[in-house]
Image: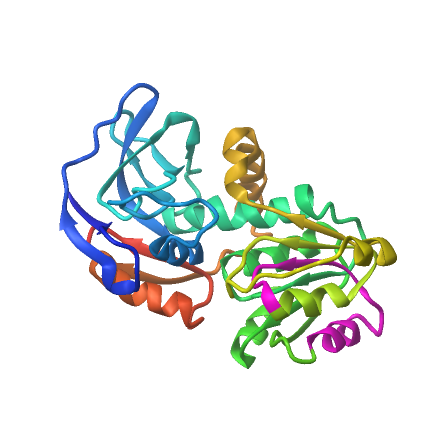
Amino acid sequence: MRAIQIKQFGGPEVLELVELPKPQPAGEEVLIRVTLAGLNFSDTHTRTNSYVRKATLPLVPGSEVAGVREDTGERVVALTGSGGYAEYAKVPAQLTFPIPPQLDDATALALLIQGTTAWHLYRTAGRVLDGESVVVHAAAGGVGSLAIQLGRLFGARPVIATASSAEKRQLALELGADVAIDGAAEGLTERLIAANDGRAVDVVFEMSGGDVFDASYRALAHFGRIVVCGIASQQPNTLSSGSLLRHSRSVVGFYLFHCLEHPGMFGQALSELFALVREQRLRVVVGRTYALGEVRQAHVDLRERRTSGKLLLDPTV
């Protein structure tokens, strides 16, 4: 089968298109013929071995796929952990989820990681209450574009979006953000408070780290929460317990793959998300689909923030 393999860590050039044997499932695993693989920002960290979960070489990257189960012929999305950038992938049966007939593969795949992340940011990590203000950073991305919409559906007010360009901010407004502002770190604290009518904000979903985290933290109200769901900048932060105490603020980490220990956490979220899409209350923004041989360009585009919505890799072309 055709697959992308990493034999050494480094830049996009280490992503090699190779021929490998078809995976052989064992025990409770199933084999999936992949129609689409998900491209995630975290994949660029895996490529350099700078992600939360360390990688072992050689490696076929890719943590999620949509496709067809070889044993049943059922259309599914599945969490692979690794091995998704290929024509076939083996996965634990309990981490495969049927795709409803009304949904196409791209839409379902966009909900598997990005959708469940956005859902858990509200329900599990942020515990957002009706009427609380929510800041969604990187609002035009896969997680952000869904988090904006879920905020309105879940009763957050206002939903404040940040994005790096006027075009992305316009998309955020079209998706239901009440306000969309520049996400650059300089002056961000003041812009967030101004966007909330001069009041400190209640909840921030933050995936950059570094200066953006610090600016967002300073904008928090008493009893405010900042939920860390990524460190795209790879810049570390230092926070004192005294600061948390003085301001009654909370910092919560959320790593979706800890939910693998409780597969029901995916099933519950997906069930609600699939229903919202069927009812046309949730819009999935699908971005570019890259051919398997274009994977290096896909990683460049991800790192340089050229993209919007869910990015996909097509192993059939």
Q: Is residue 195 magenta?
A: yes
Find residue 54 and report its image quarter. Answer: top left
Position of residue 148 in the picture relative to residue 248 (left or right):
left
User: Does residue 263 appear in the picture of this structure?
Assistant: no
Q: Position of residue 290 (x, y in %)?
A: 29, 61
Residue extent of the magenta highlight = 188-210
Q: Is residue 173 magenta?
A: no
Q: Nearer the viewer, residue 105 or 266?
A: 266
Q: Nearer the viewer, residue 131 or 223?
A: 223
User: Does residue 306 appear in the picture of this structure?
Assistant: yes
Q: Position of residue 65 (x, y in %)?
A: 35, 43
Q: Position of residue 307 (x, y in %)?
A: 43, 69
Report the number of discs. Answer: 0
| Quadrant occupied by the N terminus | top left
- The colour scheme used here is rainbow
Give the residue displayed 46% in from the left and 62% down from the top.
309
- In the orientation shown, which residue stands out farthest toward the top? 27
Position of residue 10 in the picture relative to residue 116 (left or right):
left
Find residue 202 and report its image quarter. Answer: bottom right
| Quadrant occupied by the C terminus | bottom left
**Relative vertical location of residue 222 with respect to residue 262 in this rendering, above or below:** below
Give the residue displayed 53% in from the left and 48% down from the top.
115
Position of residue 265 in the picture relative to residue 153 (left or right):
left
Give the residue displayed 17% in from the left and 35% down from the top.
22
Find residue 212 and report its image quarter. Answer: bottom right
Give the residue displayed 29% in from the left and 36% down from the top.
68
